[in-house]
Amino acid sequence: MSNGEKVTIRKLPTGVPGLDEVLGGGIPEYSFNLIAGGPGSGKTTLAHQILFANATVERPALYFTVLGEPTLKMLRYQQQFRFFDLEKVGRCIHLLNLSQVVLEQDLSQVLASIARDVDAANPAFVVVDSFRTVTRAARPGEMELQSFVQRLALLLTSWQATSFLVGEYVESEMRDNPVLTVADGILFLTQAVERNSIVRKLQVVKMRGQAPVPGLHVFRITDDGLQVFPRLHVRLPAVREAKEDQRLPTGIPGLDEMLGGGIPQGDAVLVAGPSGAGKSLLTTQFIAEGASRGEPGVIAIFEEQIGDYLANARTLGFDLDAMIRSGDVRIVYLRPLDLSVDETLYELQERAAAVSAKRVVVDSVAGFEMALAPTFREDFRESLYRLVGALTGGGMAVLLPTEVTESFLDLRFSPHLVSFLADDIILLRYVEIEGRLRRVIAVVKMRGSRHSHEIREFEITGSGLVVGEPLRGYRGILSGMPVPGDGLTQAPFPGLTDREMLVLRAVTDAEEPTVPELARLTALRRPALTLALDRLVALSYAVRVKEGDHLVYRRA
Amino acid sequence: MGESPQAVRAWVREKLIREAGENGPPATMAAAAEHILRPLSAHLARLVGDAGFEALLARAVALARREVPALCADPGGGQEGLVQCLREMEGEHVCGSATAVVTALVDLLASFVGVDLATSLLREAWPDLPEMGDGAERAGDT
């Protein structure tokens, strides 16, 4: 008799962008579902959106309203959404008011009333909104409620209806509730207010017969209704193992040379520098170079409006408008101030997929942080990690301009402590030399890749950023206040003996030397060397650092 | 009520006169009004509930009184209360009052859900309802 064929459960599209993906393909046909959440969380809108996406004359929907929002007001407000098709009301979607039955009769009568309507209309979809008020009005005992829900589920499933109970339930009520036990699927909507922003989230608590994406998924309600931004699984560097060692030239000759030919495909690059140092120019040049090579790019901006951004690019000598028109570049402006990382990712990936982007600029790290809702800002590093991980995992090179406060005392790559997630770091810096402020550029880090260790001067010209020759004859350039020569000959070092000066010079010249290395470099015997080093440390000319099993010395 | 769609107004008046005659007695005219309202109340009550329909009708009566002050201030009792009120009115006002109430009700529904959806809902009760104009969206503002 059996030929081993299992039943195929048809999955119905919800009509909600992103939700089918979260559900594991859609709503299972004939399933009995609960849409739960607090007031204003979007339950009714979600139910409507699903019905308008599915109901037809041949497969109509029954929408039972019960004591909640007056039906006329519901129709008044819901028709503001673009998915609301007036033609479907009364033809494909039939609204019925159950309030009187619920108020005046018991649950068995309510069930009988629903059964009569279902029998008459033969609907493919049924919604009861709000189901909570049905059970509240009847004040049933636990067993009576369990029995009612069970019989309702049986009735609707037997009639081959895919059904949705809409109810105001809060999280604490989710346990030991008979409705939740019987339901095949539970969608739980929440909205959290933090400071001045609201973040809406959806959770598929259960969905029998399929595997939904676990976790909380951010959603937004716009004129188009709900849009869900599935919490993406970050594609970690494993994907990148297969990548070819392809370089994406920046179009800045000297810089490409320093980078060993360009930015490796799939790398995240922190472009750190103070305001006005040339970060925007560098990133724009990177995008423009890509456009000229048939490597499309996407720019995400958070601080400036698109018009202003394009105008700025024009003043820098780049016609981004033309690149947008030709389809080589997309710009996405994101600044609702209650943004989620998933929403940002969705927008960026949509744009990137539309042009098959190879290059992405997230301008800027601080702007992205400010655009996020406070709840995501709290864990900004994770948000940025997920964003960058997903983009680079897709093989795109991502430039992250980040503004750093110019300090002449220390060197910081990012105020966000995000440099750990960057594969490469390009540092732009002002330095004061002979009473003039000059700009220098350095490739501080390139993960797993050879690169120049030079510090080069650069200029901003009408044709973009021009990188010059290495800046020689100075020490301490990245401190912002370099000194000519090796930094020791002219600088006063009071209190040091000739021997101690010799050791200090060796510490400065070598890269974090150990004691044996210093002994070799200075030809000093251990006791004398140790004594000199102790003095240098005591006088704060040098610092002693433990590196693994060794002690190394650095200039203080 | 001056902004109610003239086509709807004429349609209601024509239905009343066709059933009750041009100068029909109040009871006959009230019965004709009841025959117009009955399918509507049955249909709308399924959508908005009995209480919802009664609330709409009460508001329609209040709006109609601006046009026909002789209409009962607060007939109560929903459709039955209105019909009873019409029966007790002087003959010359009954047709005008019934027309004003039904037109106001149509107008009111359109002001909540828009002309298109209102027309669609009303046609299920009154298949021969004529097209409504934009004025219907402004019920209650007069």
Image: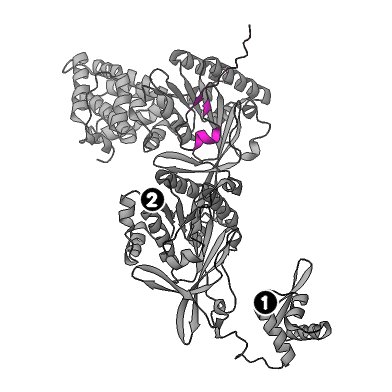
How many marks do you count on the picture? 2
How far apart, in angstroms, are the residues tagged by discs 2 and 1? 44 Å
Q: Determine which residue is flagged by label 2.
A: A294
Residue A12 magenta-drawn?
yes
Farthest-out residue, left: B22
Q: Is residue A309 left or right of residue A130?
A: left
Overall secondary structure of the magenta stretch?
loop
Give percent across and percent down for residue A384: 55, 55
Nearest to the eye among marks 2 and 1: give it. Answer: 1
In this rendering, do the residues under marks 2 and 1 share a single chain?
A: yes
Give percent across and percent down for residue A431: 50, 79
Q: Residue at x 28, y 26 (%)?
A: B119
Q: Secondary structure at mark 2?
A: loop
Assign the N terminus of chain A to one quadrant of the image: top right
Q: Earlier in the sequence, mark 2 or mark 1?
A: 2
| A531, above or below A288, in the image | below
Q: Where does the magenta region start and end?
A: A1-29
Q: Residue at x 56, y 30 (%)?
A: A34
Chain letter behind tag 2 = A
* Residue A105: quarter of image: top right
Foreground: B97 or A540? A540
Q: Secondary structure at mark 1?
A: loop
Can residue B105 be seen in this snapshot? no
Residue type, label 2: Gly
Foreground: B19 or A447? A447
Residue type, label 1: Ala
Q: Determine which residue is flagged by label 1.
A: A510
| A348, above or below A173, in the image | below
